[in-house]
Amino acid sequence: MEAQQKKKNRFLPFILGGVILIAGYFGFNKVRYMMTHEDTENAYLEADILTVSPKIQGYISKVYVNENQFVKAGDTLFVLDNRDYMLRVQQAEASMHQAEANVGFIAANASTAGANVGTAEANYRTSTAGVESSTSSVQTAQANVDAAQARAWQYAQDFQRYAALLPQKAVTQQQYDAAKAAKENADAALAAAQSQLETAKRQVEVSRRQSEAGKSQTSSYQTQATAASRNVAVARTLSEQRRLDLEQARLNLSYTVITAPASGFIAKKTAQVGQLANVGSPLCSLVSDKNLWITANFKETQVGKMQPGQVVQVKVDAYEDVVFNGKIEGISPATGAKFSLLPPDNASGNFVKIVQRIPVRVVLTDAPDPSRPLRAGMSVKVIVPEN
């Protein structure tokens, strides 16, 4: 027994030395790993999560999706009762057609008013020309009167001389009669010229009244034409408003069909047939299957040498011994605490130094593996080897 014990004691140093060597080897590797790698388990998978909600109010008449169902962008998810909105479209169409008809009617009136202005202006120009012509006629008639008066005076003087000479037999009866006839003819011509002058003056007054009436009528028609133009502008504005109302009614009608804004999986579906859907109320969530990334919250002491584009390794808790490849897409410009609802104020109270976490965005570079689907919220471990 003593010999066996001595034999065991002789090999004990070798055994202890081997254990120490193995422990040292693994310890050295662990230290070297810690010196050349940065890792964190404070990391989670993230994805775009969209809230599907209606833009209008209405009762749900059809539901086409179930919880966890995959849908493509543009697929119909829910349909609201559209009878009220169809009626509004019909009302808007009728209002728009009525407004368009009013525009045509008012435009026709405006065209007539414009034509009346043209006619009145032509009449005014004609009456103005008549005034000028009548004035010229008065001037001519006045000249004729002046000439007739001169002749009548001359013939009257001749007649008086012949009348004084006739008793003395200095002139013949024939010469006397001729002088008398010439005087009477001159008097008649003067009377006729004076009558023509009065007529010409009356014509001037008539032409002036017609010109003034034409001017007043032209002004009246111009006022009517201006008012008609304004009415046309108002009618066209109203018609455009009715057209926009129709577009809005049609747009609201299209909102009764709620489609998927992107491809992904349905989650948190609360919509049921017959339920009243209010504007902005969530009917379901849509988790995108395209854009997955990882938010890894590294300590501030770990990110000193990290930079965008750096290669990383990712281990997902759901799939042990499987390593996914990725890269750093970006590093947050602030710590996570700065984005919290109540960020700490280290300037007040007693200060206790706490190592802060900085979110690092990581994207996977491997192609999606259908046998190992990734879901938003999964816990992962991110390893960043030293370049």
Image: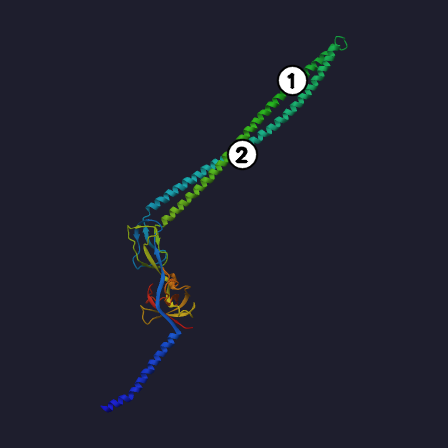
Q: Which residue is mark 2?
A: 118
Disc 1, SS: helix
**Would residue 110 be seen by someone viewing this image from the given angle?**
no
- Up/down of 229 relative to 317, above or below: above
Residue toward you, 359 or 75: 359
* Location of residue 6 in the rendering, given as x and y in whole percent from the top left corner: 26, 90
Q: Residue at x 58, y 30 (%)?
A: 126
> Quadrant location of residue 184?
top right
> Quadrant location of residue 161?
top right
Residue toward you, 343 or 100: 343
- Side of 289 relative to 190 (left or right): left
- Side of 17 relative to 127 (left or right): left
Q: Amino acid at mark 1?
A: Ala
Q: Pick the quarter of the image with the C terminus.
A: bottom left
* Location of residue 242 in the rendering, given as x and y in whole percent from the top left corner: 41, 43
- Up/down of 60 relative to 384, above or below: above
* Location of residue 246 in the rendering, given as x and y in whole percent from the top left corner: 40, 45
Numbered marks: total: 2
Q: Amino acid at mark 2?
A: Gly
* Location of residue 311 in the rendering, given as x and y in whole percent from the top left corner: 41, 70
Q: Residue at x 62, y 27 (%)?
A: 133
Q: Residues within 10 Å of mark 2 (few under 14, many from 20)?
A: some
Q: Which residue is mark 1?
A: 191
- Residue reaching furthest to the bottom: 3
Disc 2, SS: helix
- Residue reaching furthest to the left: 1
Q: Pick the quarter of the image with the N terminus.
A: bottom left
Residue toward you, 6 or 33: 6
Is label 1 in contact with label 2 (beta carbons under 8 Å)? Answer: no
